[in-house]
Image (tube, coloured by chain):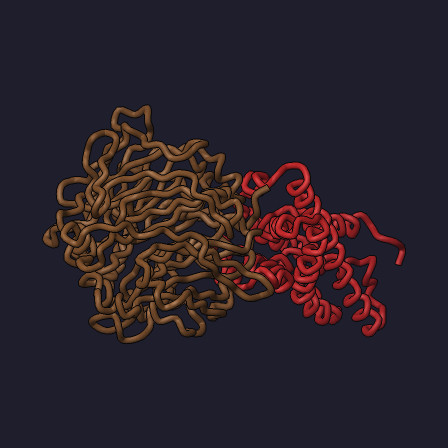
Amino acid sequence: MTLRPDPTFHASPRLAMDAPQEAYCYTLLLSADPSKPDALAVVDLNPKSPTYSQVVHTLEMPFKGDEFHHFGWNACSSALSPLSAHAFVERRYLIIPGLRSSRIYVVDTRPHPTQAKIHRIIESSEVLRETGYSRTHTVHCGPEGVYIGALGGTGANGMGGPPGLFLMDCQSLDIIGRWEKEQGPQRMYYDFWWNLPRDYMVASEWGLPIQFESGLVKDDLLNNRYGHHLHFWGLRSRRHLQAIDLGANYQMVLEVRPAHDPSKEYGFAGVVINTATLEGSVWTWWREGGRFHAKKTISIPAEPCPNDRLPEILKGFGAVPPLLADLALSMDDRLLFVSCWGTGEVRQYDVSDPWRPVLVSQLWLGGIARRTRHPNGKSFPGGPQMLELSLDGKRIYWTNSFYSTWDDQFYPGGVSGIQVMAHVRGRGLEYAKDFWVTAPDGYRAHQIHLEGGDCSTDSFCYPST
Amino acid sequence: MVGMDWTVAGLWGVVALSGVYHGANPAMGWPLAVSAALMDRTPSSLASAFWPLAVGHFLAMLVVVLPFALVVSLVEWKFQIRIAAALTVMTFGVYRLLMPRHPRALSRIPPSQLGLWSFMAALAHGAGLMILPIYLGICTSDTLTPGHEAARRLLETHLALAGFVSAVHTLTMVLTGGLMAWLAYRYLGLSFIARSWFNLDAVWASSLIAVGALSLFLTLLG
């Protein structure tokens, strides 16, 4: 507990944009070799530092087989509402769930990022006992503490019961229990986020544990058995409000990005692939007249490619699907960045009108067929995957791994961990030629979080003025 | 009644000041009024947000003070009642000092139910307890209860006083909170919320202990 609110908490997205430039980031490292544990890398982002663009600290976990994917902070700007009743908690602990192991690591980032150390480990048996959930994934800090999304239920394969959310106390870091008051119809999970004052949450669907743990199940994909719904929940009532079916062809609804400004009642969601056209798509969802609506507003086409240049999983498709992976929305809600892990591109859209996005610029890097090299001459394994945008919207970082078994299917040549960065200029994206982070040997890189908050962490109780 | 003496005037002053104290504290809700005005893009939402905040706070005062208003009419027990009230307030202060966490139920109240939130927040912080010894001090002051008033008349006076003390406290609370909200909304901007927010948990708990101790001391002395 502190005497003043944590200086990295901002009342509005507008104020968050004026925060000091990030000096470090935390990047999750996934071990491709199952005999080695996963790790957390701390990367120096200060361009004036002699160790700029290098991993300056690696924290290896004591256990193996966790499959690090997403993670989050114990607290963020959402604490600045009297309603949340914990204004003096600090942004200090990283909550890192193992997606395969359901084990949760709590990492203390004090006194300095380069001294990050394990504070606590919550075993999967405890998670399962307290919540009935497994396959822990998305982490968000909010009014009731830390919300953790789980992609699986009980049982050996996580199929004995529905997936869902559970709560962790943001100060004691104990697991509180299931979040839902009523289970509702959601049977698959991926991402979730919310609008705090409007009191609703939106959640997405990837697939069941057996549909992703051993790799993409082609038959399930071609038969449209992955998730294709958006779900809306009451944030405090903890009840399911509405489901929207985007259409059976729209397979795997991943990231949801509500407008940061809580006075705006819309947001975006990304769909990996359309099984009829192979396109990737972004949907704009909004609330109007008490109901939620969704409309496809961005469509990114597949690129034709001879079958002999495609990996086994795509043979017969005759094209490389974009495999739309991640979205990043700038704090001013004007720019939306989209990563396409298959074709190997990052696109920047102007979404000032959220129903009519305009493509501003795009950068190519890696990709199944193109294999575009970085301007520094090096080849980029895999394709752009997890994005992270700085609070001021001027720097966008990304890594290249999707999920261990999926990496092996789509990029059989290997996906050694790389993190790059591009400057967001007035006319579009421009590579930072001197920024190229290589993960330690044998590691792949997944989600990135910036030291003092970023565009996928903080949520706000007050609109921008 | 020969008019208030200085002690009673001082006690009323404390009632008003405690309202200022509660109103200025962001934890009692003024930032929510700023948020409402900005969300709706009209300053009238700032004023309308203070209605439920005030009603909730007023009821949280009343729910603590009223039971004491009923029993303090038993004139022969007023010494014991004042001691009991002082000890209750001190105990709650010590509890808040040792257990500064807020009940999680507070964060489960939807933003649309500001009145309920305000009531629960004031109750959880012991806002009503803080004015209880002051209220009892006014009730049992010699100018008000010379000792030979009819019991029924005394009860009416005490009930009216409970409402009046709660109202004066809530009024200064709303005026102060409203001023803070207006300044943040109109002139100082949202950064004022984080800048003006101090962790008052320890100070607040200490205030409860101090009010209780002072009341205990005065009761024993008088």
Q: Residue furthest left?
A: A35
- In this image, A363 relative to B23: left or right? left
Q: Is residue A401 above or below residue A440?
A: below
Residue A451 position by quadrant: top left
Residue B119 position by quadrant: bottom right
Residue A313 image position (x, y, % from top left): 18, 59
| Residue for point 58% across, 62% down | A288
Residue B80 image position (x, y, % from top left): 65, 66
Q: How many marks?
A: 0
Viewer can see residue B99 = no
Nearest the eye: B99 or A379 = A379
Viewer can see residue A254 = yes
| Residue for point 17% across, 54% down | A307
- In this image, A114 relative to A268: left or right? left
> What tint does the image give chain A?
brown
Residue B165 image position (x, y, % from top left): 75, 58
Nearest the eye: A400 or B88 = A400
Nearest the eye: A98 or A257 = A257
Q: Which quadrant is the C terminus of chain A positioned in?
A: top right
In the picture, which chain is red? Answer: B
